[in-house]
Amino acid sequence: MLPTAVLFLRVLNENKTQRDETALKQKGIEYLAELAPLISALAESQSSSLQGVTQEPAALTAAVARVQGVDATLGGELDTTSRWSGLKEKIGRLPGVTGTAGDVYEAHVEVGDLALELYGAVRENSKLNQDAQSDIWFLQETVTVNMPEAVTHVSRMGDLANMLAAAKNNQRAPLQVQFGAEVLAVEESVAELTDNLQAAAEDTDSSTLASNTVNNLDSFRRGVEAANRGANIGQAPDVSILVTAQSTLTNALKALATVLLKEMSTLLDERIDELDYRRAEAWVMLVVSIVLLTVAAFWTRVRTVRAGRETASESGRDVSVQGDNPPGFAGGGFGGQPAWER
């Protein structure tokens, strides 16, 4: 029974470890679902601030409240509370930023970079980036890296185009360099996003992943194509096209993020169900092993008792025969004498 118990405890311990890791990843997905709107809200705040609006957008206020709520619940387990507190403080300072358009833009860039770092912290601390299942890994890479970067860079590309249109001649050169860098960053993010989604769809057991992502991915690609036309590299960017493309991309990425997070959650739920089945199976096998060992021990005991009784019975018969025919006595008859002597 000792080897059986040891094997059972090892299986149970490994099952518990996997369940705990899966539960942590589910909490990471829950956090990401509330974090996703913050990136789009920061992009809106950046654009409105560059247009002279000092009041914080309602979308940003709502997004901050949502992240604050989920961090209060999960921040301790995901070790994000300190990082979120710093980001929240800097977001609160954005409406008070003054100076040139460049100053306002750089303040928002700093906050946007911190938001991207928060994505990375959730991704790493929830161990989503360590998942061995390939489709989940590609999906988490898309959701936590490619998508927020794409939204951020598209937003910066559009705002830099506006700044270029209003800039004086001596200010255009550095802005043009920044604008070109953002265009390249958008193209890189989009290429990686597309590749990761394709890899996830090719290696998944989900029957809904491909169908659920097609429409949203097509909308996203149309937005990227429009953004590239509006960028008009080498010439003056078309601001109106960029603004429309930015809106299209933001909406498409919101929808795509919702779909991908749901797919990841479903895949992890299926993993939990499988782990539950394995745990139940281990318990059943332990009970069966104990029952078999008990039956074997009982049967062995019964056979031993029967064998002992049979041995005792045989010994009794031997003793009885010897008592009826004592040594030295031959034959039988009346008075202990042979018949021929009577």
Image: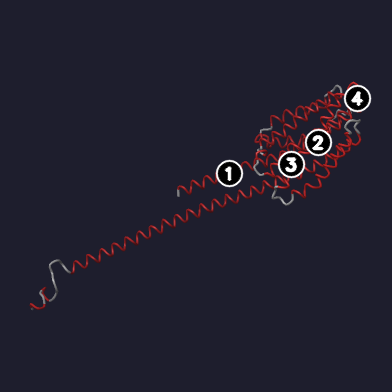
Q: Nearer the viewer, residue 226 or 60?
A: 226
Foreground: disc 2 or disc 4: 2
* Residue 175, image x, y percentages: 86, 26
Q: How much space separates mark 2 and mark 4, taking CA atoms?
A: 25 Å
Tell me the element at label 1. helix
Give the residue type at disc 4.
Answer: Ala
Q: Where residue 322 sits in the image (x, y, percent)?
A: 19, 66
Dot placed on the residue nearer the N-terminal end, 4 or 1: 1
- CA gap between label 3 and label 4 equals 38 Å
Q: Earlier in the sequence, mark 3 or mark 4?
A: 4
Position of residue 187 relative to residue 265, above or below, is above
Query: In 3D space, how far apart are the residues under numbered discs 1 and 2 (Cα atoms)?
Result: 42 Å
The chosen color scheme is secondary structure
Q: Check disc 2 and report the residue beneath it.
A: 187
Going by the numbered disc 3, the residue's amino acid type is Asn
Q: CA distance from mark 3 to mark 2?
A: 14 Å
**What residue sits right under mark 1 in the picture?**
16
Q: Which mark is residue 167?
A: 4
CB-based contact (under 8 Å), mark 2 and mark 4:
no
Residue 259, quarter of picture: top right
* Residue most extreme to the left: 341
Residue 111 vertical position relative to residue 268 in the rendered view, above or below: above
The label shown at residue 196 is 3
Amino acid type at circle 1 is Lys
Badge 4: residue crowd in 10 Å (few <14, some 14–19, many ≥20): some
